Image (cartoon, grey):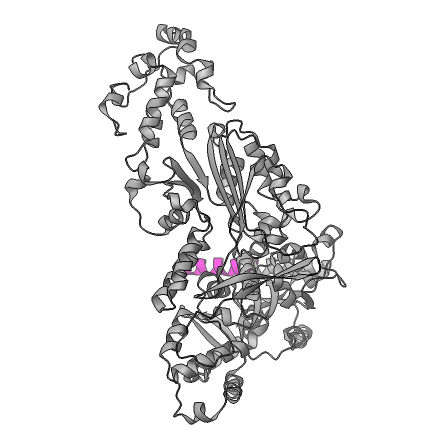
Amino acid sequence: MAIGVPLKVRSFFRPNLGKRSRSTRSSNSSLEVKWKKRIEPWVPHDELVACDNAVVVSDQDVGAVDPQLDSPFLQELPLEIRRVIYEYVWSNTQDHMFHVPNGRHIYFQRGRWHNIRCVMHEMDEDPDFIQKQMDMIYESGGTDSDNGNLQLWQRRLSQTWGHHHWRCEERIHHPREPRVDKTNFASMMVICKRIYPEVMQSIFESHHFHFNDLYSAYRFFVSHPPAFVSHMRHLDLTFDMSFADYAPFIFKTASKRKNYITPIWKALADMDCLQNLRVSFDIYDRGPWRTVPESNVTKGALDLRVVNNFVVELPASMPIYNMLFQKQELSEDDGMPFEIVRRPALRYWEFHPHEVERFRWDTHAKGNLKVCWVTLLNSSRHIPNPVPSPSSSMSADRSGLQATASLQLSSAFFGKFPLEVREMIYSEFWVVSGLNQHVFSHDGRLTHCPCLLVPGEEDERNDEFEEVWQNRRRSRNGSLMVDDEWSSRFSSTWNDHWRCEEGMLSDPARRQGTLFLPALLTCKRMYLEALQSLYASVTLVFIDPATAHHSLVASPTSTTPLLHSLQFSLAMPYDVLHHHRYYSTPAQNPGPWVELCTTLSNLVRFNSLRRVTLRLDLADDRNWWEVRERWVLSAVRGMLARCLTVQLPEVTVRLEWLKPYQYAEGDKTQFKLKRYPRLQWAGTDEGHVVPRLEFLRPIERWDVVRESRLQKAKRGLKDLLSGLKGC
């Protein structure tokens, strides 16, 4: 027996569990006829079908299921005794260590389902347990070790699995003892087909299941529900979601807008056997929960039938007046069929990287209106050896440098010049080095070079090449021409910064002639002062989507929050721009474009980013008028739109069915929208410069296609002749 149960239980199972070859006996054999007669005595309908979704053995499946007539476990023990045995099999010697003995976390990750034990302790029931631990650390002093402990508990406070299951989430990211998560599920399920429905029903009835992310719950209950899901008795859902997931509930037409919470409510409403249900809601940044209409979010819970305990856990109620949603906040007096539990208000947050601050919510009565705001409590925090700096954003490395930096009072630069004069000197450093710097990947590493594009200067490749093209066309027939220089310019991945690429390739040593490193490497104090000025003055320019995603999303540095200005000139494939609309399912990744926009929005909201310029084009050979512009820019949300300038190609063809997806002239947008003329020419790998079909008349388009086919035929004929000569 592979399931590791005591001998007393083991003796009830079929003694010979070896894999047997099933003979292809006739369907009218005496054994099958005898078994058909015994279906009702040993598989009563009331025993096997506890809910609507139970799997029942039909006459069509009789030949495929072994009746197990020789098994004492199935023939001599009633179903009630077998269920007791199943529950005994699920028990573990370590159950007494945890608050929920049969708790299992279910989550979908990397294409497969995972289940781990819930290691929640009894003390984790206290919703304020984590912040109480932070109170003890905060009040004990301000040493570096205490600050590190605060950061540790802050990470636990901000985890998406909620305050109940922070221990469980930590086990996913760190090596864990497999013995704790071991189960007998698979061993019991593969014993035989006859026992499989009973085992599955017992698994769902005997365990307390926890889902801690929206996508796993949606996939489990809505898109791919298992056959025995209606047997579930105890369920715990934790939805710590982004503001975008709550956005459909804000509008008046919330019931008609697509979201992933309402289908889960409907799936749970079909389950008549739920005994205990707890649903917890929260939002990533914990800030704008007051803008979420709670009654709309929990409206689907009114149709649920829960036998015992039904709890809905919500963030703390803040005394902040909201004219739009003042009647949407839930309270115990509303007569809801569930208990409403409010978590304590937050009093710790990491407002700046690696700096956990304690704060309080202050209120001020203004007539009948109460105003609420956050007040930092910095009186007990001690930062040794302070260095004058206009910003309090400080990473762990810079905090260490600040603590050990010398004031350099003997230096004339620091001793005689005030900070304002030093900042003017730093600014001149950056002007000499170039205020706009390209960030790109070269030889497998990130590097930079100055941007040569004058602000406001238009791309002149169309006009300059038009003269060359007309002169060549007068002297020669045909629409194809060979020009390696112009072909590389039109096919440049640097887009409108093609002159910067040519300058970088012609003079690689120019990248080294800057004052960035000399200023940062002079001393610790100059590093701390110059770093703030550097990122406040210099604009980083990204011309490659992969580099931008890697630098800002996948692997951001500790200085990323200091950025004030960013520029993007990106040419991306059509599918990448529309990925989040064409493949918008919970199990799908939203794509690099949406992730980049989300990161930029967070940098604007929580950090120093103030200016963003975004220039878009297509990387593949498609017409821009095919792009659904409103779909593409639907990824731009929040405060990012207020400081964003978007540059899009001019729409050359306007079809009626595409007009709702495109921005027309005069449309009001949250961001500043500009149009630029798209390149009318394209470079090929063979060094040719060909016109884009988008800018040709229909008859000219046919000429280009015909000439292109003729050129291919000529090349094929030359290859054939050269091959014959070689023979």
Q: In this view, does 585 lie above or below 374?
A: above
| Residue 234 point in image, percent of width and height | 46, 33
Among the 4 quarters of the image, the one containing residue 260: top right
Q: From the image, give the main secondary structure of the stretch colored magenta.
A: helix
Task: Determine whether 653 is above or below 67 in the image.
Answer: below
Quadrant of the snapshot with the N terminus? top left
Quadrant of residue 47 within the rendered picture? top left
Q: Residue at x 67, y 50 (%)?
A: 325
**Tally of numbered tags:** 0
Specify the quadrant of the image occupied by residue 201. Answer: top left
Magenta-tinted stretch: 713-727
Q: In this view, does 52 lie to the left or right of 16?
A: right
User: Magenta stretch containing residue 338, yes or no?
Assistant: no
Please tell me which residue is depicted at 36% across the width and 69% down the height of the picture: 143
- Asked whether residue 383 appears in the rendered view, the answer is yes
Q: Position of residue 527 (x, y in %)?
A: 42, 81
Residue toward you, 43 or 663: 43
Nearer to the camera, 47 or 68: 47
The location of residue 96, given as percent across then percent down, is: 31, 37
Q: Is residue 352 left or right of residue 362?
A: left
Is residue 182 in view? no
* Magenta-drawn stretch contains 721: yes
